[in-house]
Image (cartoon, rainbow, N blue to C red):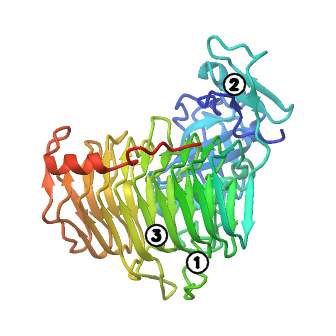
Amino acid sequence: MSDNRLSRESGNPGAQDLDRSPICAGGLAETPTGLSAPDNSLVSFGNLTNIEMVNFGTFNISRCRIASIVSGSPGATITMQTPCWTNNYAWSQYFGCGIGACRPAWIENAYEYITGCGQGCWYHDETTNILYYIPRAGENMATVPVVTPRYAHLVTGSGVNGLTFQRITFAYTVDTDASTTQGCVGIQAGYSCAGTAPGNGCDGGSFAATTTHHPLDSPVLFSSSSKNITFDHNLFTHIGGRALFGQATTQNLIETANKFVDNAGGCTQWGDITDYTNTNPATQTSGWLFRNNYREAPFEYDSTWILVAYSTGGVIDHNEFAGYAAATGYSALQTGWGWGPAYAGTASYQGGTSVANNYIHADCGALPDCGGLYFNGDFSNGGYSASGNCTVNRLAPGGTGFYSDNGSSHGTWTGNVEDDKQSVYWAGCNFCSSVTFGPGNYHTNASTFDTDTTSFSGNTMFTSGSPPPGAVAIIDAAGIQSGVMPGP
């Protein structure tokens, strides 16, 4: 048990790594090499190189560990491990503090915080390899099972053709990247910086950069021309990264009636961010159907619950996306990549995408620059459509209900419902082209944002909690279809 980011007490998903300061990292200020502290309270802490600073931006999260602490006046100088902090500092300097993740939201993996955290919290001493846990009321540690995962991958495949996984539980895996000096400097949607700035895309380089971004580990991973793979009525739970990943050149993935709960890095990624130059339809990522799945928000990283990168010809319909107060995820669903009509002079092949009749609730709890549904990049190869979707009850102020971001093109939004008093905008378009919102959408927030000449016409505003009959019909039809029970 040399590294243990995701221990679980059996039957108690709440028993996660909660040896964290109670949002008391205030007063820490970013420097090029680390942080300056307002006092010397951290100097006496044990196992300093295992302590992790968790930093929040508006759409990304970084996790970097301490290298050393030196006492001073009025407070200590904290040097962070590199290249993690080098990348994090470059990223936050490019975007500015606040948008970039420049200040810790909390301090994690410190034994000194476990008592204040209370029942259900635990700490892994990586030096002695001892796991400390404060039992909940009524628990007897002589009889309660404890699971410590060892592997990042459970199933991997290359060149697979024609395979079905049905009524299986995939559980207990790790993603250890954040526990290294590389750390995890979030870019967006679960991708993090690799290598060292400058020149690796973390210092103002392109979001669409290729090898400089690193995905989360996935226990179920298919790559290299795998095709015709079906997941039906399975459970993905206690996963240290993103539960399921079909990389570039995979084709015809079907997800029906699966359940994704208590996963650190979200549910599914389909397609890769490196595939933008692929002009051969025979090897392009394509043909996917995600239907009637129950998806819970990630709790450790800035992942989206679904990320569909460069791909074509897919459907996401009748899914339920459920958030909760401790979730850290970004937008519930991100479709597309690229931040522009073309990257490096090459138009993307992504397009032919339909997102319909999905029910999203309690989203965007931690990262305010988010969208219930979020589209990004060029979709000139067949466009995209979003219809019959419903987003309600956002957890925290910020973000946009229906969000079409940089370079998003050739999209139509019709017959959707936004009933969310917390969002800043019900819909928005940022450097878009050929995108329309309407007719037939219903919304409770009067505001939109637009950097272009996007049409927001033919839509109906209503009072939150009192939807008109047209909106009620959309809400009733959204989400998992009647008679379907996700999971094994």
- Residue 291's place in the image compared with 211, above or below, is above
Q: Which residue is mark 1?
A: 275
Determine whether the residue tagged by mark 2 lies in a helix, strand or loop: helix
Query: Which residue does the image show at 87% across and 31% down from the upper left?
Result: 128
Q: Is residue 16 left or right of residue 44?
A: left
Q: Quadrant of residue 153?
A: bottom right
Q: Which mark is residue 126?
A: none
Above or below, 443 against 16 in this view is below
Name the residue type under label 3: Gly
Q: Is residue 194 visible?
A: no
Looking at the picture, tell me which residue is in the foreground, 285 or 403.
285
Front one among 137 and 117:
137
Kindly check if marks 1 and 2 are in contact, taking CB atoms under 8 A apart as contact.
no
Residue 311, image x and y in percent?
A: 51, 74
The residue tagged with tag 3: helix, strand or loop?
A: strand
Closer mark to the observer between disc 2 and disc 3: 3
Q: CA distance from mark 1 to mark 3?
A: 16 Å
Mark 1: secondary structure: loop
Query: Which of the two discs, 1 and 2, labels the residue nearer the N terminus?
Result: 2
Q: Amino acid at mark 1?
A: Asp
The 10 Å Cα crowd at callout 2, few under 14, some 14 to 19, many 20 or more, is: some
Q: Tell me the residue that label 2 is attached to.
A: 112
Q: Residues within 10 Å of mark 3 (few under 14, many from 20)?
A: many
* Location of mark 3 (residue): 314
Q: Classify residue 67 as left or right of residue 191.
A: right
